[in-house]
Image: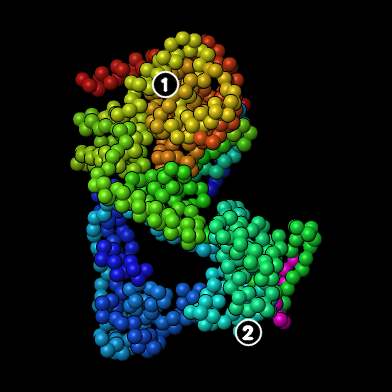
Amino acid sequence: MEEKDFKCLRCGTISKFPYEKGVMMERQCLKCGSNSIRLVKEKKKEEKKKE
Amino acid sequence: MMDVGRHPNIKLLTCSQVESISGYVGNFHVRVHKKARYVVESECTACNDCVEVCPVIIPDEYQQGLSSRKAIYIPFPQAVPSAYLIDMNNCLGTNPIACGKCAEKCDKKCIDYDMKDEIIEFDVGTVIVATGMDVFDPTPLDEYGYGTYENVITSMEFERLLSAGGPSDGHFIRPTDRRKPKTVGFIQCVGSRCEQRGQPYCSNICCMNTIKDTLLLKDHYPDIEAKVFYIDMRAFGKGFEDLFKRSKEAGVQYIRGIPGEIIEDSKTRNLKILVEDTTANKMEEHEFEMMVLSVGVTPRLDMPEVQKLLTLSKTPDGFFMEAHPKLKPVDAPTSGVFFAGCAEAPKDVKDSVTQASAAAARAETLLAAGKVKLEAITSELNADLCRFCTICAQACPYKAITVDPKKKTISYIEALCKGCGTCGAECRFSAIKMKHFTDEQIVSQIDTYLEEDSYDKVIIFACNWCSYAGADTCGGARLQYPPSSRLIRTMCSGRVDEKFVLHAFRKGAPMVVVSGCHYVDCHYIDANRWTQKRVEKLWDKLERLGIRPERLLLEWISAAEGRRFAQTMQDIEELRKKVTKEEIEHTIKILTEEEEKERQKQEKLKK
């Protein structure tokens, strides 16, 4: 399973988690333990790089 | 088994596979594929004449491959019915010209090569799942050399070797030279209690099985030296400690430490191990003529198929999840379905019989009552408003709703509904309403909580079974959490509609939290996956509208995690303090405009 960047909405930490499109899985922030883990979309990444 | 076979009220279907189960408690319709036996059961007297002439020789699965069987055989000595069957995958052919020796030999003409598979259909009121378990295969564990060194065997193979009906007629011999070994070593927890090399859980039965094996060995051969290598010996049941003591008194040596590797001496075929005795705190070297790997228990490979048939859920260890671990340990989450034996968790014979008796009693209670009392918390369908989008049917974990978008029909079986409310939260056309925890009730709660000083409040939607109970645990343990928290209970986090979250923001909530059970604990099979999907969509929507998605959080908190609940609330309180009044007012403005747009859109649609 490929790994993608996810952002914790509670503490802002970006970590890599396994990801497969359409497959739901429980993710937990490695730093604060929150489950509010949001996929960092590719567009945003590119924008960040440009910045 | 014989009693079951003879019982007038029990119909035993052997060589059969359940293809489908439809319906609900009291009204299950079962479709079974009964495979052809190719031997007329009622005529066969198990005289063995056919077996003697069969030319096919293949490994006997029942004897763990240590002896052979024929293509026509009885799977194991006590099999019911006591009649032969032909293994068509290995038979030389159904055409009597190709072989047909068994048919020629059978005086009673019981062999029927033309026998066909059958489909049997019947109705039942309840279902008991007793699908058993598999045994861990130690072949991938290279360090023990199972499959490479012939004198390394599993506890199952040991069992067969010592059995009077086994491949060596009960004579314990080592496979390489077929003589009685002088020393035997047992290694515990093979495939158990290790996440990387097997299963993370304790298999429950292996310690007592090894103690019994050592006692049997000492009983048959007092001169054989036996040593057991273990992590912990778990002899916790009635009479088990006595058995453990007897084994030690019989001369069996128990060494606390698991060998890292088994090395075979190529000349003697003896097995050498190096182990750290953690009690004596020293490294020891031992040599054995045979090693027995005490293998653990694993869920059956075909469990996903059974899971699909009955819409069951599984615990993280892969076994079926009961409706409640303490109050309903034999009930499945689906009404009218019960568990017996290792389908639910690894257990020994006594526990399996206890659970099977309980399952039978639970099933009988339902059948004797003749009718079922349902929970009042179910959903209500208004077919007139339905647009047949099928989302409710997809979301329902119990398959209570079926929609045919082509025929534009929707059917709902209330007896199957458990009231999680996921369908109601997913329906965009208000065609599904809940009988309790209604939209109006939840919206009123939000309004009341945010009526005054909304900027200081955090709205938390908590599921009844885990998160709300977690808050209770937190309170019961006198753990402190911020007074800004305002909890709204729903039966499942799947009930938390998008509109509730947006309504809370529109009413001035600085933070909204949706919390539910951890994935594996979901009391409605997989309803909380829909919660996550919905929250992920909401994050995108909030961002699109210019609202920080960080203000909506998703947290899985179990009933036991009172401390986690308190910590989460404290962290969220810090985030709440960072939300400014200007930001909240901006959110209210955006969402009010959005609501107005939506209202106008709906009006247009109605026209």
Q: What's the magenta region? A: B266-274
Q: Quadrant of residue B402?
A: top left
Q: Is residue B273 magenta?
A: yes
Is the residue B389 above or below the residue B258 in the image?
above
How many tags in the picture?
Answer: 2
Secondary structure of residue under mark 2: loop
**Which amino acid lies under the numbered mark 2 shown in the image of this protein?**
Arg
Q: Quadrant of residue B154?
A: bottom right
Gap between marks 2 and 1, in whole Å? 78 Å
Q: Position of residue A26 (x, y in %)?
A: 51, 40
User: Going 40% across and 32% down the picture, which residue do you hit?
Assistant: B491
Q: Which residue is mark 2?
A: B179
Q: Quadrant of residue B387?
A: top left
Circles 2 and 1 on the same chain = yes
**From the image, which quarter does the C terminus of chain B lie in?**
top left
Is the residue B395 above or below the residue B167 in the image?
above
**Which amino acid lies under the numbered mark 1 shown in the image of this protein?**
Leu
Q: Which residue is mark 1?
A: B502
The answer to whether the residues at label 2 and label 1 have Cβ atoms under 8 Å apart is no
**From the image, which quarter does the N terminus of chain B lie in?**
bottom left
Q: Position of residue B198 (x, y in %)?
A: 58, 57
Q: Position of residue B364 (x, y in %)?
A: 31, 52
Sooner in the amino-acid sequence: mark 2 or mark 1:
2
